C-alpha cells in the first residue's frame, strides 16, 4: 500500500457533536458517548457495527480502550495516539490506512472534554514536558503562541489589527451558527481594547474554554454509497512535527504545516487553489495567519495583510473557520475533532446560514501542543474522486 492508494480510500458517513459550550454535570466520557451515538446514528448504524475505535482524551490514560468499554464495542483495531489537538485529524489518516489494509471495516473517531465544567479555566501544563521552562512559571500555552505572534510582528510587520481581523471573522461566522458558544457583535476595536492577557494577545485573541464532544464514522470508499447521508471522502493527509517545547521550535514564524500541507496536497493531487473551504485550528489568532501562509494560501509574511478587509469572513473570498472556530464556537481543550465535523457538514451542504457556496473540497488542519504537531487532511465530495 502506497500513499497514492489512500486517496479516496475512505469516506466519512456519520458525524455528531455533544455538549458544545457548557455541559454541567457531564463527564468527558459521557460527552464522548453522546457524540459517538449521534455519529453512529447519523450513519444509520448501531454501536455494534463499529469494529475500530480511534479515540483521544485529556483525562483517560488508555483512551481507545476506555471508550470502547464505555460504548460496549469490541474492536478488532484501535488507536489512542495522543499528539495534542491534532490527534483526531491524524486518526482520520490512521483509520483510512487501517481500512485500506483490511484491518477493520467501520471506524469511530472521537473526542470529548468537560474542561469548562470541570475547571472553568485554562490549566497550564509546562512542567509535564519542560522542567527548564517551568521555574519561570509560564502561562502555557498562551505564552508560547504569544512568542510566535511577537516574532511574526517583528519580522513581517504584522499588527494587532491584523490579528483582530481573524477574531472578528470568526465571530461573524459564529453568529451564523446556532451551535456556537459565543454570539454577538465584535469589532476590530473590541479586540484591540480587550483586556491584555499576554502581549500581544488580548482576551479576544485567545480560544474559548468550553465543554464538548465530537465523533465521526469512517468506512471504505466502496461502501460509502450504502449509507443515508452524503459521503465525504478522504483525499489526502499528512502529519509532521519538529518540536515539543516552544524553545526548540526552529523558527517561530514557520510551523511544520509547511511540510504536512504540501504532502497532503500531493496525495490529493490538488493545490490551494482547488480548496473551497478552510477549517484551521485557531487556538489563537496568530494560528490562522501562520497556517494560511504555511499551507500555501499566501506567501510567508503576508498572512496579516491577506486577512484584511474581511477576506476570510462571511461574504469574503475565502471561507475560513466557518463554524466560528476555536475563538468563538467551541474549544474543549483539543479542537481537531470539531473542524473535521464542520468540514463534513460543509461538504454535505448541511451548514445552514453559514454554508459556503459550491463547497466541493475542504482542508482541515490540526495543531497540537505549542505549534508542535501539525496534521493536514483534505476532504472532498464524490465529484472530486
Image: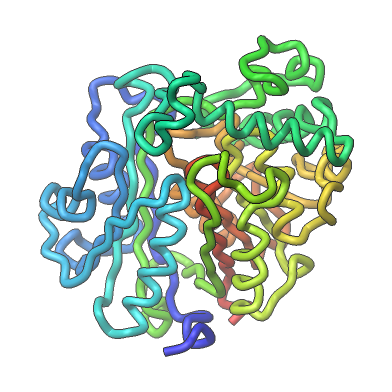
Q: Position of residue 372 (x, y in %)?
A: 53, 48
Name which residue lies at 75% across and 15% down. Answer: 190
Q: Observer-nearest residue: 325 or 385?
A: 325
Report whether 55 appears left or right of 1: left
Q: Position of residue 258 (x, y in %)?
A: 67, 60
Q: Is residue 383 visible?
A: no
Q: Position of residue 338 (x, y in %)?
A: 47, 46
Q: Is residue 288 above or below residue 82?
A: above
Name which residue lies at 35% across and 40% down. Answer: 213
The quadrant of the rendering that contains the N terminus is: bottom left
Give the image quarter of residue 126: top left
Name which residue lies at 86% across and 47% down. Answer: 302
Report whether 98 appears left or right of 325: left
Name which residue lies at 16% across and 54% down. Answer: 65
Q: Is residue 269 visible?
A: yes
Report whether 111 appears left or right of 277: left
Amino acid at each position: 500500500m502506497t500513499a497514492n492508494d489512500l486517496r479516496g480510500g475512505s469516506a466519512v458517513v456519520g458525524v455528531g457533536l455533544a455538549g458544545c459550550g457548557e455541559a454541567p454535570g457531564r463527564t468527558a466520557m459521557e460527552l464522548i458517548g453522546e457524540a459517538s451515538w449521534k455519529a453512529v446514528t447519523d450513519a444509520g448504524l448501531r454501536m455494534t457495527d463499529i469494529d475500530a475505535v480511534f479515540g483521544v482524551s485529556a483525562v483517560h490514560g488508555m483512551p481507545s480502550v476506555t471508550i470502547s468499554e464505555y460504548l460496549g464495542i469490541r474492536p478488532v483495531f484501535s488507536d489512542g495516539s495522543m499528539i495534542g489537538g491534532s490527534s483526531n485529524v491524524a486518526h482520520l489518516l490512521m483509520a483510512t490506512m487501517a481500512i485500506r489494509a483490511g484491518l477493520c471495516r467501520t471506524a469511530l473517531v472521537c473526542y470529548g472534554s468537560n474542561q469548562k465544567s470541570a475547571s472553568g479555566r485554562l490549566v497550564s501544563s509546562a512542567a509535564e514536558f519542560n522542567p527548564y521552562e517551568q521555574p519561570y512559571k509560564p502561562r502555557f500555552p498562551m505564552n508560547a503562541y504569544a512568542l510566535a505572534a511577537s516574532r511574526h510582528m517583528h519580522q513581517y510587520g504584522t499588527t494587532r489589527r491584523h490579528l483582530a481581523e481573524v477574531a472578528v471573522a470568526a465571530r461573524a461566522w459564529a453568529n451564523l451558527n446556532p451551535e456556537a458558544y459565543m454570539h454577538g457583535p465584535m469589532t476590530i476595536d473590541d479586540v484591540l481594547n480587550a483586556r491584555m492577557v499576554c502581549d500581544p494577545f488580548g482576551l479576544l485573541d485567545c480560544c474559548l474554554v468550553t465543554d464538548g464532544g465530537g465523533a465521526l464514522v469512517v468506512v471504505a470508499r466502496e461502501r460509502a454509497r450504502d449509507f443515508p447521508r452524503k459521503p465525504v471522502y478522504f483525499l489526502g493527509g499528512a502529519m509532521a512535527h519538529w518540536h515539543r517545547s516552544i524553545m526548540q521550535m526552529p523558527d517561530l514564524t514557520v510551523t511544520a504545516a509547511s511540510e504536512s500541507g504540501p504532502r497532503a496536497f500531493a496525495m490529493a493531487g490538488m493545490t490551494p487553489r482547488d480548496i473551497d473551504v478552510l477549517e484551521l485550528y485557531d487556538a489563537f489568532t496568530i494560528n490562522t495567519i501562520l497556517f494560511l501562509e504555511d499551507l500555501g494560501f499566501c506567501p510567508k509574511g503576508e498572512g496579516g495583510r491577506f486577512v484584511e478587509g474581511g477576506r476570510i469572513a462571511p461574504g469574503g473570498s475565502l471561507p475560513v473557520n466557518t463554524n466560528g472556530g476555536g475563538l468563538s464556537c467551541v474549544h474543549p481543550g483539543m479542537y481537531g475533532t470539531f473542524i473535521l465535523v464542520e468540514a463534513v457538514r460543509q461538504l454535505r451542504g448541511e451548514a445552514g446560514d453559514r454554508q459556503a457556496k459550491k463547497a466541493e473540497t475542504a482542508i482541515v488542519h490540526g495543531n497540537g501542543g505549542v505549534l508542535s504537531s501539525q496534521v493536514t487532511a483534505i476532504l472532498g465530495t464524490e465529484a472530486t474522486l
